[in-house]
Amino acid sequence: MRIRSEVSSPYITTEDQKMAEIGNALAHPLRVALVRYLSTKDKGEGLDNATCNKDLVEMFDYSQSTMSQHVKILKDCGLFTVEQKDQFRYYFLNRELLKEYNKFLDQLS
């Protein structure tokens, strides 16, 4: 069996690739918990309602480096956006992308 580094098929759309990337990001329990946590904390605009990187480390009791690796995956697929202020990073949940993903999953059933 040959493994391809890039998927190319007339049947695989860019949306399929994007949804697979999101699914892959959500394939780890900690990342699912991070999305759930941000969905409850990220309720408004601005940094006052945002979640800081130190908050995530305290809440989930993982090392800063472990949290950074998991957050990077969520950021790379677009589920998290990050805003830097001073030495802190603040995370926001991309609710629109999460809604798109949910809609995509609904279409599969």
Image: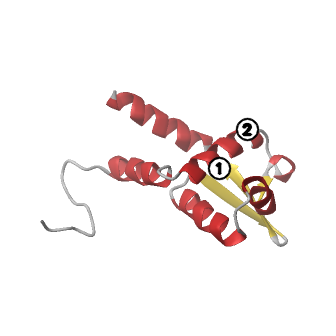
Image quadrant where residue 63 sits: bottom right
Give above or below for 22 relative to 95.
below
Taking the image as shown, residue 27 lies to the left or right of residue 54, namely: left
Q: From this viewpoint, is residue 84 visible?
A: yes
Taking the image as shown, residue 25 lies to the left or right of residue 51, namely: left
Using a 10 Å C-alpha cutoff, classify the residue at mark 2 as few (fewer than 14 neighbours), some (14 to 19) or many (20 or more).
few
**Farthest-out residue, front:** 61
Answer yes or no: do the residues labelled 2 and 1 have beta carbons within 8 Å?
no
Percent x, y of residue 24? 43, 53
Q: Residue at x 61, y 41 (%)?
A: 95
Q: Residue at x 48, y 34 (%)?
A: 102
Label 1 sits on what residue type? Leu
Looking at the image, how many numbered discs can be counted on the residues?
A: 2
Quadrant (top left, top right, bottom left, bottom right) of the N terminus: bottom left
Percent x, y of residue 26? 50, 49
> In what element is the residue under mark 2?
helix
Which residue is tagged 1? 34
Determine the CA span between mark 2 and mark 1. 10 Å
Q: From this viewpoint, is residue 79 visible?
A: no
Quadrant (top left, top right, bottom left, bottom right) of the C terminus: top left
Using a 10 Å C-alpha cutoff, classify the residue at mark 1 as few (fewer than 14 neighbours), some (14 to 19) or many (20 or more).
many
Check residue 100 in the rendering and tell me which mark sits there, or answer none: none
Which residue is tagged 2? 40
> In what element is the residue under mark 1?
helix
Label 2 sits on what residue type? Thr
Front-most of residues 13 and 32: 32
Front-most of residues 70 and 15: 70
